[in-house]
C-alpha cells in the first residue's frame, strides 16, 4: 500500500444510498418484503469506514478513536435523536394504550443502539409475531451499524497489535486477513442460523458482520492500487444495479435473510462500487447514473428518509386500522416522508451540525452525545414503566369499559402460553402439561400448534365437566403431521417433535386426541394429507380423534381496528371467503377413518358472508388469527355437545 492515500469523493455512493433507501421505503409501504436496501447500507458502511480507519493508520501510525467516534456522532446522532423524541411523543398521543409500554421500551433500546437485540429476543416469542411492528423498529439496522463501528475499530486495533508484535509485516495484509476471517465466519454463521430456522437470525449482529466485511475487503483492494478495466467494470456495474433492483422480488422473503439470500444485494453493491472505481470512468458506467445531480441530491437525505418513513407508516396503519396500503395513501406516506426527511436534514445540517457540532472538540461532542442518549433512554424506559401501571389500572377499572375490553383482549390468550406449556418454535422437546380433572380415569390430549392451543379454554372446560384428565402437547407453528414438508412452517424441529410425540403416544395411548382438522392459511382452506395419516395411526392404537375446523384469519389486526373504529365497530370484519372454504374440507374427504369426529363451529364465528371482530360483548380475536381465550371458552358448550360420548 502506498505511504499516502487520497480518498476521493464518490458521488455514485450517494446515488446508491438513495436507490437503496427508496427501495426500502417502497417495499415497506406496498409490498411487505425485504428489498435488500439495508444490506447495501451495510456494504457501503463497511467500505467507507475501512477507508477512514486505514487512512488514520497511514497518517498517524495509530488509530484516533476520539476523532472517529465524534465525527460519526456529529453526522448520525442529531437526526436519530430527533426522530426518537418525535416518535416518543407520537406514541403517547396517537398509539393505543396497550402498545405504549413496549414501544417506549424499544425507544430506549434504540437510543442505546441495542434495538436489534431487543427485537431478536422478542422474535423467539411466537405470540409477538402477530403484534404490529413498533414505530422505531427500523432502528434495528442503525443498532447493528452502531455496533459495527465499535467492532471495526477493535478489529483494526487487533491488526495493529499483530503488526507491532510480528514486525516486518504489512498492516494491510494483516487487516485483510482479519476481515477475511470475519467475512467467512460471519457468513457461515448466518447460513447456519437461517438453515436452522432461527427466528432471531435476521436481527443478530453476528449474521451481518460479513456484509460490512465485503465492503471493507473491497476498500482494501482499491487502496492497494487495484483498479478495474472498463471492459469489466461497465457491465459489472449494470449487473450490480439489476441485482439490487430485483432482489426484493426474487429473494425478498424475510425468512431467507440474511443467509445465502443476502449475497444477492451484497454482490450488487460490491459490483457497483467496483464499477465506480474503474481505471477511467466510462460514459456508459452505472456510476454516471448514480452520480447524477438528482440522485446525489436524494442521497443527501436518504438517512433521514429511512428513519422517518417507518413511523409514518406504522401510525397510519394504527390510526386507520388497516394493514394493506393502497396506491393513494401509499404515495402520500412516501411523499410525506420525503418532505420531512428533506426539511429535517437541511435544518440539522445547517443548524446543529455546522453551527454547533463542527465547532466543538471531539471530547465535547462525545460527552454531550452520550448524555443526550442516556437521558432519552432513561425517560423512555421510565415513561414506559409508568404507562404499564396505567394500563393495569385501566384493565381493572370497569368504568373504562371499552378501552378495558380492548386492552384485556390484547392479552387474552390461553394460560398454556403463560405457564410454559407451549413449546417454542426452535425446540423439538415435547412438553406435556396436565389440566382438566387431574384425577380423571380417562385421558384426552390436545395436540398441535397455536391454532390448536387457542381452543384450550373450551377443551379444558369440557374435560372438567366430563371428569377427564387433559394432557396438552403443543408447539408453536407446528402441525400434527408426520409429513415433513407439511410441518416445514415450524422448521426441522417440528418434524422431530412429531416423531418424539408419537413415540410417547404409542407408549401410553390416551382415549381421545383433540386437534385441528383443516388449515386456513390465507391460500385457501384444506386438510393436509399428513393429518389423515396421523389419524389413521391413532386409529391403529385405538385412539379416538376430535378434529376441529380451523378459524378465519385476518389481514389487519382486529383489536386495532376496533380501537380505530370505536364509533363503528361493525366496520371491523374479515370476509369469510378470504379464509374459509364453502364447505368443511375435512368433511368432503372420503378417506377419513372411522375414529374421527369432525366439529365445525365456524358458523358461530361468522355468518354466510363476514366474520366480525366482536360477538355481542366479546372480542373474538386477540390477534390476526387466534381466538381470544374468553371467546373460545364461550364455545365450550357448542363443541362439547358434538364430542363423542
Image (cartoon, helix red, strand yellow):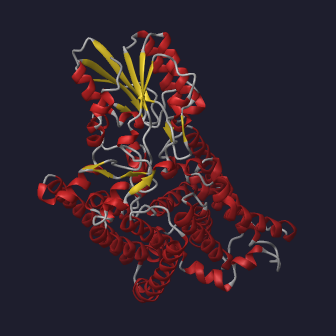
Quadrant of the image containing the N terminus: bottom right
The quarter of the image holding the C terminus is top left
- The answer to whether residue 242 is above or below residue 7 is above
Residue 575 image point, x, y percent? 46, 53
Q: Nearer the viewer, residue 374 or 549?
A: 549
- The extreme right residue here reads 231
> Residue 230, relative to residue 607: is it above or below?
below
Tell me: 206 left or right of 405: right
Question: What residue lies at 56% left-to-right and 35% top-to-bottom?
Answer: 488
Q: Is 615 left, or right, of 316 in this rendering?
A: left
Q: Is residue 566 visible?
A: yes
Residue 188 lies left or right of residue 113; in this view the side is right
**Image location of residue 375, percent across then percent down:** 27, 69
Kindly indicate the quadrant of the structure image that contains residue 233. Answer: bottom right
Viewer-side residue, 302 vs 321: 321
Number of disc labels: 0
Q: Quadrant of residue 92?
A: bottom left
Image coordinates of residue 265 in percent, x first then y, are 66, 59
**Of 181 and 625, the residue lying toward us:** 625
Residue 186, given in percent of the width and then of the height, sits at 58, 47
Quadrant hosting residue 425: top left
- In depth, the one of 274 and 261 nearer the eye is 261
The residue positioned 54% from the left and 69% from the top of the image is 25
Amino acid at each position: 500500500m502506498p505511504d499516502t492515500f487520497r480518498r476521493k469523493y464518490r458521488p455514485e455512493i450517494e446515488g446508491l444510498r438513495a436507490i437503496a433507501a427508496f427501495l426500502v421505503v417502497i417495499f415497506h409501504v406496498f409490498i411487505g418484503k425485504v428489498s435488500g436496501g439495508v444490506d447495501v447500507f451495510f456494504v457501503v458502511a463497511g467500505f467507507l469506514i475501512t477507508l477512514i480507519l486505514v487512512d488514520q493508520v497511514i497518517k498517524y501510525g495509530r488509530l484516533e478513536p476520539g476523532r472517529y467516534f465524534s465525527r460519526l456522532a456529529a453526522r448520525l446522532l442529531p437526526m436519530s435523536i430527533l426522530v426518537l423524541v418525535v416518535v416518543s411523543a407520537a406514541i403517547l398521543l396517537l398509539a393505543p394504550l396497550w402498545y405504549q409500554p413496549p414501544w417506549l421500551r424499544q425507544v430506549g433500546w434504540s437510543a442505546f443502539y441495542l434495538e436489534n437485540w431487543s427485537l431478536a429476543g422478542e422474535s423467539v416469542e411466537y405470540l409477538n409475531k402477530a403484534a404490529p411492528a413498533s414505530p422505531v423498529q427500523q432502528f434495528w439496522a442503525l443498532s447493528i451499524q452502531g455496533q459495527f463501528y465499535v467492532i471495526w475499530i477493535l478489529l483494526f486495533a487487533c491488526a495493529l497489535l499483530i503488526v507491532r508484535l510480528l514486525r516486518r509485516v504489512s498492516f494491510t495484509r494483516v487487516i485483510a486477513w482479519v476481515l477475511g476471517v470475519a467475512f467467512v465466519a460471519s457468513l457461515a454463521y448466518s447460513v447456519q442460523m437461517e438453515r436452522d430456522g432461527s427466528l432471531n437470525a435476521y436481527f443478530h449482529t453476528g449474521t451481518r458482520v460479513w456484509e460490512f466485511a465485503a465492503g471493507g475487503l473491497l476498500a482494501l483492494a482499491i487502496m492497494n492500487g487495484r483498479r478495474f478495466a472498463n471492459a469489466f467494470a461497465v457491465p459489472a456495474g449494470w449487473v450490480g444495479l439489476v441485482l439490487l433492483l430485483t432482489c426484493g422480488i426474487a429473494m425478498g422473503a424475510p425468512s431467507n435473510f440474511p443467509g445465502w439470500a443476502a449475497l444477492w444485494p451484497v454482490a450488487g453493491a460490491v459490483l457497483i462500487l467496483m464499477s465506480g472505481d474503474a481505471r477511467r470512468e466510462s460514459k456508459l458506467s452505472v456510476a454516471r447514473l448514480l452520480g447524477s445531480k438528482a440522485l446525489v441530491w436524494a442521497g443527501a437525505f436518504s438517512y433521514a428518509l429511512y428513519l422517518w418513513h417507518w413511523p409514518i407508516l406504522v401510525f397510519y396503519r394504527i390510526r386507520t386500522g388497516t394493514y394493506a396500503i393502497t396506491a393513494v395513501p401509499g404515495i402520500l406516506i412516501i411523499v410525506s416522508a420525503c418532505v420531512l426527511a428533506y426539511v429535517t436534514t437541511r435544518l440539522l445540517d445547517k443548524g446543529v451540525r455546522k453551527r454547533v457540532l463542527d465547532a466543538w472538540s471531539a471530547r465535547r461532542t462525545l460527552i454531550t452525545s452520550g448524555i443526550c442518549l442516556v437521558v432519552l433512554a432513561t425517560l423512555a424506559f421510565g415513561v414506559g414503566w409508568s404507562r404499564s401501571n396505567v394500563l393495569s389500572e385501566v384493565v381493572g377499572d370497569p368504568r373504562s369499559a371499552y378501552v378495558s375490553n380492548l386492552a384485556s383482549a390484547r392479552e387474552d390468550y390461553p394460560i398454556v402460553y403463560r405457564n410454559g406449556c407451549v413449546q417454542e418454535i426452535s425446540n423439538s422437546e415435547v412438553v406435556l402439561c396436565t389440566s382438566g380433572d387431574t384425577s380423571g380415569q380417562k385421558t384426552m390430549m390436545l395436540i398441535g400448534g397455536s391454532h390448536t392451543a387457542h381452543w384450550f379454554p373450551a377443551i379444558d372446560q369440557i374435560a372438567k365437566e366430563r371428569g377427564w384428565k387433559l394432557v396438552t402437547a403443543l408447539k408453536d407453528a407446528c402441525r400434527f403431521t408426520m409429513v415433513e414438508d407439511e410441518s416445514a412452517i415450524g422448521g426441522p424441529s417440528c418434524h422431530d417433535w412429531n416423531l418424539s410425540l408419537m413415540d410417547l403416544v404409542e407408549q401410553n395411548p390416551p382415549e381421545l386426541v383433540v386437534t385441528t382438522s383443516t388449515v386456513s392459511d390465507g391460500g385457501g382452506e384444506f386438510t393436509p394429507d399428513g393429518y389423515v395419516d396421523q389419524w389413521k395411526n391413532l386409529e391403529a392404537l385405538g385412539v379416538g380423534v376430535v378434529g376441529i375446523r380451523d378459524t378465519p384469519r385476518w389481514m389487519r389486526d382486529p383489536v386495532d381496528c376496533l380501537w380505530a373504529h370505536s364509533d363503528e365497530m361493525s366496520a371491523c370484519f374479515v370476509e369469510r371467503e378470504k379464509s374459509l372454504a364453502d364447505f368443511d374440507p375435512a368433511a368432503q374427504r372420503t378417506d377419513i377413518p372411522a375414529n374421527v369426529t369432525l366439529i365445525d363451529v365456524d358458523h358461530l364465528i361468522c355468518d354466510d358472508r363476514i366474520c366480525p371482530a366482536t360477538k355481542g360483548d366479546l372480542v373474538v380475536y386477540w390477534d390476526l388469527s387466534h381466538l381470544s381465550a374468553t371467546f373460545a371458552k364461550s364455545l365450550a358448550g357448542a363443541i362439547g355437545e358434538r364430542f363423542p360420548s
